[in-house]
Amino acid sequence: MVIKFKYADKIPPVFRNKYFLTLAIFLIWVTFLDGNNLIERFSQLRDLHKLKTEKEYYEKKIEEDRKMLNELKTDNHNLEKFAREQYRMKRKDEDLYIVLTPREDRMIKRENN
């Protein structure tokens, strides 16, 4: 005995095919429902790419800092220059004038407020 639905003839034959239905359910499952679904997978790949670029940036920064540290340890002239530029140190008989860019000036104003 075969049960016929009232609107079964209006459904295209492709959608009544059991292989097509199985494939459609599988694709829906893999795309949305599974723990390792495709959406989550693409999100993780995007995060991985971002982390790799950050890693490259920090490796370059570490290398630059190592070079700077080596220069500071080997030459007192470089150490004095670094102290004057970064920490605004001066000798007793000197005057210090600080020239800020507009961007630096805005940042200092924000920090003080």
Image (cartoon, rainbow, N blue to C red):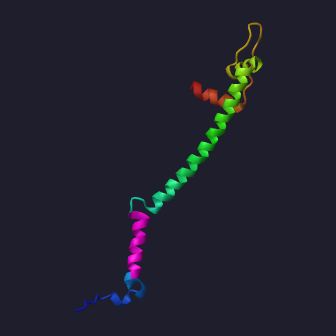
Instruction: Please provide percent x and percent y for residue 35.
Output: 39, 59
Q: Residue at (43%, 61%) from the top-left corner?
A: 37
Placement of the N terminus among the 4 image quadrants? bottom left
Q: Of all residues shown, which one is farthest toward the top?
A: 93
Residue 11 in which image quadrant:
bottom left
Residue 85 in which image quadrant:
top right
Q: Main secondary structure of the magenta part?
A: helix
Say whether residue 24 is magenta.
Answer: yes
Q: Nearer the viewer, residue 105 or 78?
A: 78
Q: Which residues are magenta?
A: 19-33
Compared across the picture, whether 96 is left or right of 35 comes to right
Residue 109 in which image quadrant:
top right
Q: Nearer the viewer, residue 14 or 73?
A: 73
Q: Nearer the viewer, residue 19 or 2?
A: 19
Q: Is residue 38 above or below residue 53?
A: below
Q: Is residue 30 above or below residue 78?
A: below
